[in-house]
């Protein structure tokens, strides 16, 4: 995953354009993405797919012709979605188009102007301070024209048409944690899940933030009723603890599964309520959809100083954090895949476990074995109302113990799976 | 309000009689009350409107003819509703008809005997101790005869027939906090609200305690189904913190609105559960009505030592406490008036706020402006289920911010008001 | 009760056999039990009634002919349900059939092998250590043959066919707290309740653990719908605090009644959630029955070191603990018997209590008498939805005060009992 992040880092991405296409193409090397191209001008709910933006070069030259700001040194230097410009400007005029971050004088901030035509440069505070009162040549060799919005989609068919949606935003340029880490995690998660026989179908979306989610939802509205669980993936490569942000519903299965996993994962974690500010859970959880979609991150966006600056670079993320995050995602999906309801086929009194070799023959001990206790819990609560996660929480036993116990009881015809709405 | 309290202070009130009439007449100078007269003997549920009581004079004279207890010094001196009497009595016999309060030897307690014919005097402990073993002349020049129970009512028509009921008890003689403060607050609250265009209709009741509420409810039973919210007003002039006593329902809108206001009012406050002891919320919240009526007071009745004694006088209440209390009432009513449900007209994904000038054009900042966050919250939760108060509590933003945000969104046709039961 | 425990202590009981019969016979001297005999081989849900076990003698003799383990010294010495055997064995072979408890070297543990044919002896660790390398003669003079499972049942008819079930296990040999204490308590509870006129019918079961409950439920399934409340009685003679284990439902009336009593009983107590491990509540609370049956004990089984050892003897239980436990049971049943719903016959406003002599004639005091407050609470909440226990918890007044208040109001025709489902 880190290798993939490093490979994608130099590319200048935005919500549209060739940088996104190059990124998606690279991802097809890992997982066979379908790449969709949606024409500029397509109406998507209250929005319209914007013109496509591409950029080749951008700089500010001083009177000696030296590039004091140079897109080729960092693609963050250009205000993302800047219109083309080539002019001579005085320092005061230039300043109106410069963005800097005084708190961290070495860092270049990341700024965008997607929906209002504008031009500008993002510079470090030190660069800004060093500018002298003279005339500058500014050049942004970009284009903003009718074109397409590109996104990637990978659909993995499971036993059921019910879907889990896993979404990440592809629009950020050279920023590693937000969100090359998310791209890499989703690609490898998809690759890994492809090797298993799955209960749910999985849909992995590689979309530009906001407009991508809106576009996908507008063009795929009929599919949304199949979405049973979902996660928005971002900021999964830093060394901070985990944060799970609940879905708008607050008590969806995904919320309970993520909370269970984090409680038992052995790392610092926080669980926060839904709020309508954040990443694409904003769209998935808008009131007209209200999908059960949460977001699992390390340090959430906006809560680390490097966020949206040039300091969110390859040294801010690490392979072990990425793999730890992948493991957390797999653990959550493991719970979802296996969190069924069962029905006890001998619901009146306990079945005779001893006869089946499932219960100790010698009685009278003060303690019960935990394997036997797990069987008693699963039998007692398998009434079609309790999921395995309900049982594991009530019994205070690990999910995997409850799951393997259910499988043993199933193999002895003591349980059956509760299909559909037996609740 | 303090001026009104001072003007009403000398009048001897009771549950019936000319003192109440004089009080109501004075109030008509502030707000155009209708004054109702209900004949003695009228059956009102399990009760009967009692005979009317009036008093001109009352005293205890010692053997020298000196008035050692004198109604004209304080109308608290007479046991309220005493039957007429003029007799010579020994000290031991007199003592059986004297009420005092040993803990505060200077204070005259307030005692009543409305429903059992009796006579008596309330005296300070010092007065009692000074009485010598001799014969006394007692005189209570009162009348207890067929007459009327008088109460005042002011109805303010709003856009809807749904009503807010605001009730205060008028029966206490020279006692300021309990409840001349309540009379004054309700009169000025009514006057103030008269100048506004209102959503709800308001009914202000100036009634004697217990029998007045029972009488009003018995004679106006058909109106009670329109009562959507209500408050019983008492003890609002002292310097203590606020106490809100919840309605019997415990989670009525009035309970939530009052709790919200007190949490944010910047004063000490307590919120207490309903109990069936107190003032006229006892009747409004009896199980056959179970109206959403709470009570907002400063220090509640019975919890300040001056309660029901001559020390609840003009120096116990203060203009600034009265106006502070009025402000709290207005704040609660402001929430009720504006606490509507709205429906997001673009419920699928977020609407494009930037296009409407409602969202910052430059993206990428770590922080969202609180005005933008408020818009996102209102849009996300305006699904016809959440009131503005729900949204303000979930967003942890002030009600007024949420309200003004809803108005902005309404003006951009992004919301519409949810009329009736769209829930 | 202690005398009964002492009388039953020497008898060797098991899940079947003459020891149980002798025990039940002794109990008929206190309460007229019906004794039921269920033939071996009877199918009971997933189980079958086992063969009947009886034992006359058992020993291990050393090479000198000395009984180094002797059933007549303690019936715990034999592995309960051992098959008959008479053989010479080496020490290593013998050891495979010996059970001891190293943590308490003087104590003989209690072990069973009901459902797998086996033989063995339970010995103290000291006995085990003293065995020399030589040949031993082992003899278990038992029989395991077609016969019966015996249990006792006493049914006490109350005004309603709705039942309270009180169950205790009869299968343990010379162990006092677990569960001769339970047998004694249930016998005396039944005897005591026989002298009262009762609302509920009561069914007292003296059954062997697990198989007895399964057998009773299998043969009496049609009666289970009448069971409205139930308690499993065990370990009620030790000096520990009380423990109430909730029913599977967790909020059944029995759970609330027991919690109320323990909160007010003045002893240490714990209330624990249902778990499917324990005594016969496992069967009563299996998902196919899910009966409202909890368990009220002192120190629960497995939580005292003497549990299932020879140290659970006559000095481990005490008369005062038994009587204290009986009192707790009677208190819980008192709540259940009296925990009705009432309807206020004057639900609109308060009735005029003063006219009926129920309310103080002199008004104006800061405090209300608690008897008057209790009346106001009962009247306010007697709407057919609240039980007396609901009222007592909301009013924070003792159940007996609320109950006697309801009776006073009933006698004044201010309430009526809510029969059936008036809720």
Image: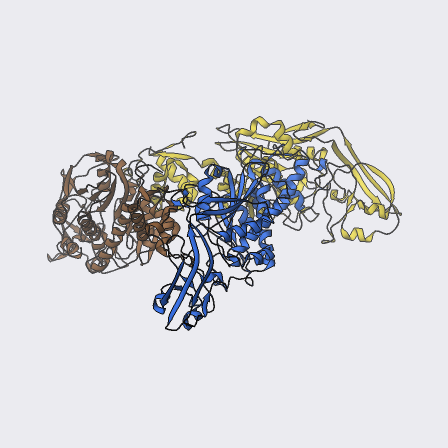
Chain colours: A yellow, B blue, C brown
Q: Name the one closer to the observer, A331 or A255.
A: A255
Q: Name the one closer to the observer, B51 or B123.
A: B51
Q: Quadrant of residue A156?
A: top right
Q: Residue at x 71, y 33 (%)?
A: A16
Q: Is residue A23 above or below residue A239?
A: above
C339 to the left or right of B146: left
Q: Is residue C142 visible?
A: no
Q: Is residue C118 visible?
A: yes
Quarter of the image containing the N terminus of chain B? bottom right
Q: Name the one closer to the observer, B364 or C223.
A: C223
Q: Quadrant of residue A353?
A: top left
In the image, residue A8 lies at what x, y percent? Answer: 67, 39
C381 to the left or right of C36: right
Q: Residue at x 52, y 28 (%)?
A: A157
Q: Name the one closer to the observer, B244 or B227.
A: B227
Say how many tags the image has: 0
B40 to the left or right of C92: right
B312 to the left or right of B102: right
Q: Residue at x 55, y 47 (%)?
A: A242
In the image, residue C416 lies at what x, y percent? Answer: 31, 42
In the image, residue B310 lies at what x, y percent? Answer: 49, 63
Q: Quadrant of residue A29?
A: top right
In the image, residue A423 lies at what x, y percent? Answer: 41, 33
């Amino acid at each position: 995953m880190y290798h993939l992040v490093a490979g994608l880092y130099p590319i200048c991405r935005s919500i549209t354009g060739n940088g996104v296409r190059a990124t998606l193409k690279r991802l097809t090397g890992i997982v066979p993405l379908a790449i969709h191209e949606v024409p500029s001008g397509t109406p998507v709910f209250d929005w319209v797919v914007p013109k496509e933006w591409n950029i080749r070069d951008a700089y500010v030259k001083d009177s000696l012709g030296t590039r004091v700001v140079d897109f080729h040194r960092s693609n963050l230097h250009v205000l993302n979605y800047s219109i083309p410009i080539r002019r001579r400007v005085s320092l005061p005029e230039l300043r109106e188009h410069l963005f800097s971050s005084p708190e961290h004088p070495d860092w270049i901030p990341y700024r965008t102007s997607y929906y209002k035509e504008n031009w500008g440069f993002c510079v470090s505070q030190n660069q800004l301070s060093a500018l002298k009162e003279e005339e500058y040549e500014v050049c942004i060799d970009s284009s903003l024209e009718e074109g397409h919005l590109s996104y990637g989609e990978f659909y993995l068919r499971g036993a059921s048409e019910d879907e889990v949606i896993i979404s990440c935003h592809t629009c950020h340029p050279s920023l590693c944690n937000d969100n090359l880490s998310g791209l890499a995690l989703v690609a490898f998660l998809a690759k890994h899940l492809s090797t298993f026989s799955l209960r749910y179908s999985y849909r992995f979306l590689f979309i530009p933030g906001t407009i991508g989610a809106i576009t996908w939802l507008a063009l795929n509205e009929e599919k949304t009723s199949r979405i049973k669980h979902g996660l928005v993936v971002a900021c999964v490569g830093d060394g901070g603890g985990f944060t799970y942000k609940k879905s708008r519903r607050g008590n969806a299965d995904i919320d309970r599964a993520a909370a269970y996993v984090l409680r038992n994962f052995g790392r610092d974690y926080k669980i926060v309520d839904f709020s309508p500010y954040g990443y694409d859970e904003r769209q998935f959880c808008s009131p007209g959809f209200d999908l059960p979609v949460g977001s699992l991150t390390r340090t959430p966006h906006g809560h680390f100083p490097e966020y949206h600056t040039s300091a969110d670079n390859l040294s801010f993320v690490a392979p072990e954090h990425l793999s730890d995050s992948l493991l957390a995602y797999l653990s959550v999906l493991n719970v979802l895949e296996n969190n069924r309801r069962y029905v006890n086929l001998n619901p009146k009194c306990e079945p005779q476990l001893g006869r089946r070799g499932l219960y100790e023959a010698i009685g009278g001990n003060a303690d019960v074995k935990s394997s036997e206790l797990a069987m008693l819990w699963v039998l007692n609560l398998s009434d079609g109302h309790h999921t395995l996660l309900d049982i594991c929480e009530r019994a205070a036993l690990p999910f995997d113990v409850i799951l393997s116990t259910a499988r043993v009881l199933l193999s002895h015809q003591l349980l059956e799976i509760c299909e559909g709405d037996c609740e």
